Amino acid sequence: MHPSSRTFDRSDLILAWLGRRKYSSAHKDLRNYHDAVHAAFTKAFGIDLDLPPMKSPIPNEDGLHGLFLQVARAYEEVRSPFSNYMCGTREISGIYQKYSQPLETAAIAMRNLHMMMLLELAELIWGSDSPHRVSRENLEAGGHPGWNAPEPADYW
């Protein structure tokens, strides 16, 4: 499939939203890029994941949006205890070799479950209020900044 014919679904919308949250305090280049990606996805899908839809006089009456935000925080908090290590002692290296792969596998499984929950909650909250898929052209028309994201490691 040619990249220009790719379509994007709500998981991509959620990942763009999570990216904006992740880089909200980062270097301005990273922050601005992820803000622009998020804005393009928000415009194309017509959904602001930060806010529940105004379907009733009492927003978020059923509490689903609050749960959506909680699941997003849980997704963001999943990490290995080795996540902040650049290097370690020989003893830490031995523990790392023993546990890092199973911990990373478990973290991936947890993030996948959180994403499944986020998608199900998005369907319950926003349902058919927006498209389920958008094209690359829709995103570019909405101001997508381009497909080559700045490399976070370049901003250390």
Image (spheres, rainbow, N blue to C red):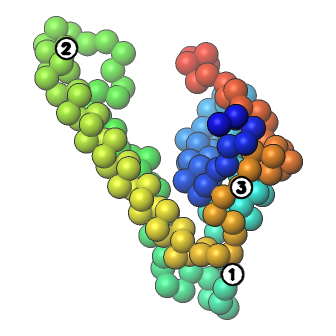
Say what amino acid the circle numbered 2 marks.
Ser
Mark 1 — residue? 54
As shown in the figure, which amino acid type bears the numbered disc 3?
Answer: Val
Residue at which label 2 appears? 93
Q: Position of residue 32 (x, y in %)?
A: 74, 36
Which of 23 and 151 lies nearest the eye of the viewer? 151
**SS of the residue under disc 1:** loop
Instruction: Residue 96: tell me if it is visible.
Output: yes
The answer to whether residue 69 is above or below residue 38 is below
Residue closer to the observer: 36 or 41: 41
Q: Quadrant of the N terminus?
A: top right
Horizontal side of residue 28 vs 108, given as left or right? right
Residue 118 in percent (x, y) is at: 47, 61
> In the image, what residue type sits under mark 1?
Met
Under tag 2, what secondary structure?
A: helix
> Residue 125 got which mark?
none
| Quadrant of the rendered image containing residue 133 | bottom right
Whether 139 is drawn above or below 51: the answer is above
User: For the residue labelled by badge 3, is the local secondary structure a helix, a strand or a loop?
Assistant: strand
